[in-house]
Image (cartoon, rainbow, N blue to C red):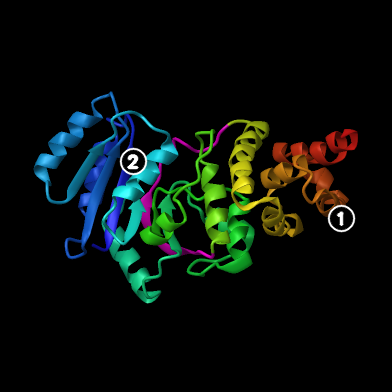
Amino acid sequence: MLFTIAIPTYNNHLTIKNAVNSCIRQDENLCYEVLILDNHSHDGTENILQEMCQVKPARLQVIRNPKTVTMYENHNLCLEHARGDYILFCHADDTLCENALQILHAKLQQRNFPQKYIVWGRSLFRDFFKNLNMAGVGFNTVLSGEDAYIPFFYSGLTPSGTCYGKYGLKEAGGFLQTKHRKATSDMSTMMYLAYLEFEFEMLDQLYFNREYASTAIKGSAEERVAALADALDVLVDKIGEAEFLKISCRAADIKSRPPLDFLTYLVRKKYHLREIKSLLLKNPTRLLRLLSNKSYRLLVKECFIKSSFN
């Protein structure tokens, strides 16, 4: 089987039917399954899924966890139970366009079906292209080696709407787990996979609708950095401080659109402090202009006030 479309769900009775229907409407000529991991929902989601299985029993595989596990564990259970060579996630409050698998199949065929490879397309709402744009990268460009890290200095890549080589991701151990439930773990996981020599590519074609983004980080710059720190600390523990320093030095050298939250984390850890201070001081006019940005103010405070007392 070529594809598994995986839907991890927990208490999504209002949206689960639309998500599943969008997944079973894919090209019948492509070999795929729709795998649903119900994380022990208690809001009626289970009954909806049972009814849908009676309509499309051959296409759907529903597994219900005996107890609720973490969001990351549920994604890794999807990975464990998937039968396809590639796993495409679709969160239970999102939907796929009808030609999603066709688009992905064409790209995978063009790339000769690689395994250490992650590919995604454009989305209605919350499109990842802003990250590529800040990193100076275009569509349909394979990112590998040191370049693979750069977009993920800005934020993580949500699994929803993203296609992974299943065997490569399983060999890597799946998604890194953190204590924080928000999506910053996607950042640390993507950096870890780049460290393991995965390649990444964003397509210029629309095949996904991510409207709600229930795990996206909201709140103050301080709250975002706190969540980010939780995820990146796991990455540092995983690969070691020396290796992380090699990776993160690229972030301290980005002059055009510095990844502010990531740099704030580095400053708090005393990583590349001299280089980051130098980056900020090279353009004092821009520094003053951007002090209205809360993330920028937090970084400046960490660099020139807090670090002076430590």
Q: Position of residue 109 (x, y in %)?
A: 34, 73
Frontmost residue, 35 versus 131: 35
Residue 216 covered by magenta stretch: yes
CB atoms of marks 2 and 1 within 8 Å: no
Q: Secondary structure at mark 1?
A: loop
Where 156 sits versus 178, above or below?
A: below
Residue holding disc 1? 282
Residue shown at 22% from the left, 45% from the top: 21
* Residue in the picture at 63% in, 31% down: 223
- Compared across the picture, whether 255 is left or right of 306 comes to left
* Residue interval drawn in magenta: 197-218
Using the image, determine if residue 69 lies above or below residue 75.
above
Q: Which residue is nearer to you in this view: 278 or 284?
A: 278
Question: Horizontal and vertical percent for residue 206?
Answer: 38, 58
Q: Would you say residue 286 is visible in this rendering? A: yes
Q: Earlier in the sequence, mark 2 or mark 1?
A: 2
